[in-house]
Amino acid sequence: MTRILHLDSSARAGLSGTDPHGSHTRRLSARFVARWRESMPDATTVYRDLAAAPPAAVSGEWVRAAFTPPAERDASMRAVLASSDALIDELLAADIVVAGVPMYNFGPPASFKAYIDNVIRVGRTFGFDRNRAGDPYWPMLAGRGKRLVLLSSRGDYGYDTPRLAHRNHVEASVATAFAYMGIEDVHCVAIEYDEFGDARLDESIAAAERDVDRLVERLVAQVTRDAEAPTAQDIVDA
């Protein structure tokens, strides 16, 4: 059984092509989850609309609580971290994170940045020991087989080419943050030409939907192979 964490962060409600002024990224993320469930009906999904209910911004109290050893936190510290704990628990339980992240002013929406700030936390998703030989930091989610599917949209075009790649701070920043926690298997699909609203947008949407469908097929096949592969215990028992 696959566990999906479905995150949306577009300020636009609804789905493009279905609702007036709907979101392209919500359209892609909903399509991915729907296609996945068609192939794997036993998959479970936890959904968060980060735009409708944005995580709280990190505060000084949050930082103080996060860097206080758990055994030494008082009730107020635990309360400050309660929402972060809930978000991290969802991430820890997920096999696949499906994130709709539109480009706003060349980067992710503030709500998604707040999400990242809440889930990157010492002792829960990354470790730190100043006395550790070499790098004092290490990713605590590495080796757990987690995948990130990042579905974006852009008003202009060419953000994956030399034309505008230097202004694209969505995929790189999100992938960097997730890799810091140990999630390095990242798959990206994006819609472009939104501000033009002409045939090029229609073509980009159609291409992105085809890419989503192919990505689902590929990842389902990988998950199936992984599930069927013998474990070390199976080999020992044989």
Image: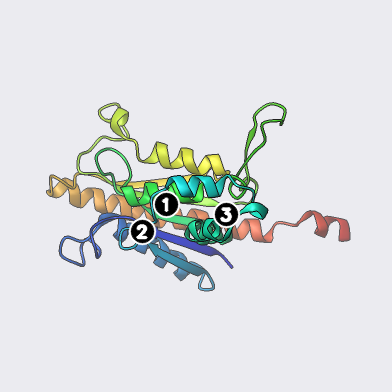
Left/right of residue 190 with respect to residue 34 in the rendered view: left
- Secondary structure of the residue carrying tag 2 is loop
- CA distance for labels 1 and 3: 28 Å
Estimate the x, y position of residue 20 in percent, counting from the top left. Answer: 15, 64
Q: Nearer the viewer, mark 1 or mark 3?
A: 1
Amino acid type of the residue tagged 1 in the rendering: Tyr
> The C terminus lies in which quarter of the figure?
bottom right
Residue ID at (65%, 47%): 143
Q: Is residue 195 toward the left or the right of residue 60 in the image?
A: left
Question: Mark 2 is on which residue type?
Answer: Leu
Is residue 179 positioned above or below 56 on the image?
A: above
Which residue, given by chain and number where applicable, does mark 2 sit on?
50
Earlier-in-chain disc, 2 versus 3: 2
Query: Which image quarter: residue 132?
Result: top right
Element on which disc 3 rests: helix
**3 vs 84, nearest the viewer:** 84
Q: Which residue is mark 3?
A: 222
Return the mark for residue 115.
1
> Measuring 25% from the left and 56% from the top, which residue is drawn there?
11
